[in-house]
Image: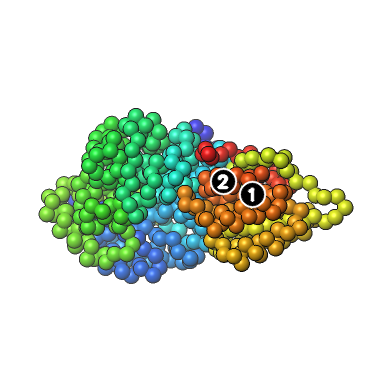
Amino acid sequence: MRRLGILFILLIMPLLTVAATSFDELSFEEKLGQTLVVFVDIDSAEQVRPLIESGKLGGVLIQWGNYSLSQTKTLINKLQSWAKKSPHQLPLLISIDYEGGTVYTPITLGFDYLPTNMMFSASGDEEGAATLAYLAGLELKRTGVHINFSPVLDVNSNPGNPIIGVRSFGSKPENVTRMGLALIDGFKAAGILSIVKHFPGHGDTSQDSHYNVPVVKASREQMQNIHLAPFAGAITHQVDGIMTGHVMYPALDAKNIATFSKPILQDLLRKKMGFNGLLVTDSLDMKGATAYCTLAGCAAKALDSGEDMILLGRYIKPVTLYNQILQEVTSRGLQKRVEVAAKKIFETKEKLGLFSNDPQDIPAPSANAYQAALEKLSDKAVTLVRDTPHLLPVTAPSGKTPTVCAVFFSPARFADQLMSLTKPFLENGWKVRSYNAALTPHQKDSQRAAQCAKGADLLIVTSLQWADKTNINQKNAINGLLKENKRTVFISTMSPYDIKNYPEAPTVLATYGLNKYVLQTAAKIILGKVKPQGTLPVEIK
């Protein structure tokens, strides 16, 4: 499949270097540490310093926080400087959850806004998706990141899924596979390893594995044809790693969640599907895992089941936990399993050239190129779900200056994005009124929204629902506005499943994310400047 055209010539090949330290020189304690990953941010970094300087930590996951790109780079450099003080100067693998959508907002870590997977899928633009992943990946690489826990390859076949939603490419396995491979290609071209998730599929769950143990009741045949298909495609595409889910699949293993399942990890994934890359746990501090064991016990259990990289979470005492894990794996006789897992991690670091002292010359990504690519993708993604009264494109009433009222229901952190919806109206001679109501509106929000809408020639109302859970206050407020003004355009700005809450909305657009680019596209569609091109990646019933 053709990706990125000439950009793929820039594919960063693994450096052929020889590690200053051979794997066999490491102590068992250091080898165990290679398999472990803890979550850090600026405030918590010092807590993991003793473990890093003793060579007993293989990697970290940088947590989202409200700090700049330069602060992120400073944090990573500091962590790696501690690693150089370890007995064998073992560099850290730096990971990030850079999957867009609900896991990212425009103010975190200083990285570029990455669209939600559902927005990528709605655009149908594989080359555009790969281009964005490539440009975003260059910035990750320049900052010192090696691994991205993305893309999500879960097929969101359950509209009531409380955790996946727009993190998925949609409800069709073929679309999930096609767009997932495009992102993998883009990140790979930038030298970033992709760890896809959540094997063997978190898309048919009705519970969140952060808080419960979800059960997927799909048959073995359904698992094969729907949920496993994107992972099979990624394996054929030689994806670097796969993250497993804390989910129970009775058709595959009636006793264990996937993270602790030898039938799923070894018999199915390794042997039958032929996967030889890194196996990574989801965070073991989630209730989906700790329902069965202590955190240290879960780490040992995951290693025993076949996992290579163990994510330990954030709110921990790193040194104490390490000692507990060491005791667990030793008492269970898991030395050989640790050896195999640690060698995979060590070889990954060699592949990435982390033992080389020669700095890599990584080209600076162009902000203009990224913005242009994102605007192009946005124009292809925004979807006209219905327009029963044929309102679009809107025509201004003759003989007067038209007025548009835009009412947004969104978190305050998105406030700087919202004016992109109203700016095109101002530029076309409209009077503009707007009101940014709370995500969960109170009576005063409804009153101010109604005041804004009163007498407007056009009313635009936006909703925001993260996944399956309907915000009743928001639903009631929006339905109230819809009754007051028949010339209304309703915009679903995150999960398109919330459209079913507004059957009275005559004209409906879906953006699959809340950012200035899709809002700008939505305005251009309403005004007739561009034609809607997006396709719904899921079924709305």
**Tag 1 secondary structure:** strand
- How far from the left and from the top, in percent, is residue 241? 35, 44
Q: CA distance from mark 2 to mark 1?
A: 9 Å
Q: Residues within 10 Å of mark 1 (few under 14, many from 20)?
A: many
Image height check: is 38 above or below 533? below
**Is residue 336 left or right of 345 when viewed as pictured?**
left
In the rendered image, which quarter is residue 225 located in?
A: top left
| Residue drawn at point x = 37 percent, y = 51 percent | 208
**Is residue 120 left or right of 255 when viewed as pictured?**
right
The disc, 2 or 1, on the residue closer to the chain's N-terminal end is 1
| Residue, disc 1 | 490
Image height check: is 31 above or below 239? below
- How far from the left and from the top, in percent, is residue 357? 36, 57
| Residue drawn at point x = 61 percent, y = 40 percent | 385
Q: Amino acid at mark 1?
A: Phe
**Is residue 143 left or right of 23 when viewed as pictured?**
right
| Residue, disc 2 | 499
